[in-house]
Each structure stands twice: as structure tokens, then as C-alpha cells.
Amino acid sequence: MIVWLNGAFGAGKTTLAEELHRRLPDALALDPEHVGFLLRRWVPVPDSGDFQDLALWRSLTAEFAIGMHREYGRHVLTPMALVDTGYQKEIFGRLAAAGVPLLHVFLEVPAEVLRRRIEAQVLDAHDARADAAARAFRLRNVDRCVAAGSALPPGTLVLRADRHDPGQLADRVLAALG
């Protein structure tokens, strides 16, 4: 199954993915951000600066997940903020059309907590300018990401990530996986 860990920047998606991988060592990790990094190098960046706005990113991300699931038959842990409902429908629709099961998990965290977490994170220890740019991008998107929690697809597992530690969150995801 594809386990898509969604939520705002700073919600704890990567930390939860690491905890799940510790408990599911045979699971595969897919970080769609790396698909975006590849595209940024080879195709024109959209005016928004967000690689998710590239149709090619969305199709490659879906096909990558489908291929990993089909080729290896393992859980695929995918921590990625995907808050545009149209993009969710596009990617999740491709997975469904390919017969790939999906557990969509949304980590809900209040905006003020997210801002504190983002301000405290070191995003690029080697490049202060890149660190500041990444932090600014994340902070600009806090409200949009939080608002996405009110328009989630049916069947989404919503977890309050500010009220539970990564172990407790992993317990809930594993219970949903059966």
C-alpha cells in the first residue's frame, strides 16, 4: 500500500515516516521532493517556483509510486505536503486507476505551532541563503496547508500531530494498515 503522509511543512511527516520505517523495515521510502529536484534541474521552473505546479511532476510522482508498488510489492512510505485538492485528485486518481491501494494520512497541527517549528528548523546547514529561502517558502504556505485540512478526500486518516508523539502516530497508522 502507498502510505501518503500529508500535512503542512513542520507537521512531522518526515519524522513519522522515519518511525514507520523503523517498524516496517521492508517498506520502501519515496520522497517526491526528489522528483521535483530532478525536474528543477532539467525543465523550466513554473512562475510559482513550486515544482508541484508542473504536470510532469504530478505524473512522474504517481508513476514512480505505482512502479515501486508493482515492482516490489511492499508498503511505500511517502511523506509529502500535497494540499492542492486538484493535485491530490490527479495523483490519487492515477493510483486508484492503477489499482494501487492508498492510505492517505493528514497530520493536523495548528498554524502557530507550525510557525514555531519552522522557525526552529535548520533546513540547509551549508547555505544560509538557501536555508532562509526554504524557511520563507514554508512560512508563506502555513495558512494554505492548514486550510487544506478542511477539504480532505473521504477516507483520509486525520491525526493531531501536536498532541501525539511520533510513536503514538505510528501506532495509529499501523492500526489503519491492519
Image (cartoon, rainbow, N blue to C red):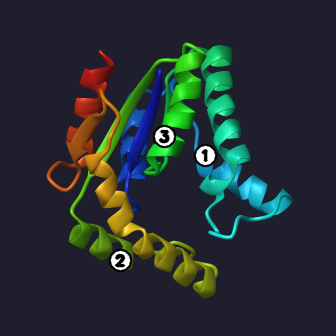
Tag nearer the camera, 2 or 1: 1
Vertical placement of residue 86 versus 28, above or below? below
Tag nearer the camera, 3 or 2: 3
8 to the left or right of 38: left
Percent position (x, y) of residue 112?
Answer: 22, 72
Q: For label 1, count other residues whose C-alpha is less than 10 Å away and answer few (under 14), some (14-19) or many (20+).
A: many
Vertical placement of residue 73 versus 165, above or below? above
The residue lying at 62 percent from left, 33 percent from top is: 62
The residue lying at 51 percent from left, 72 percent from top is: 123
The residue that mark 2 highlights is 120
Vertical placement of residue 170 versus 33, above or below? above
Amino acid type at image mark 3: Gln
The residue lying at 76 percent from left, 61 percent from top is: 40
Residue farthest to the bottom? 129
Q: Label 2 vs label 1: CA separation?
A: 24 Å
Q: Label 3 vs label 2: CA separation?
A: 29 Å
Amino acid type at image mark 2: Ala
Q: For label 2, count other residues whose C-alpha is less than 10 Å away and answer few (under 14), some (14-19) or many (20+).
A: few
Tag nearer the camera, 3 or 1: 3
Mark 2 or mark 1, earlier in chain: 1
In what element is the residue under mark 2? helix
The residue that mark 3 highlights is 88
Which mark is on residue 32? 1
Quarter of the image that includes the C terminus = top left
Percent position (x, y) of residue 64?
Answer: 67, 32
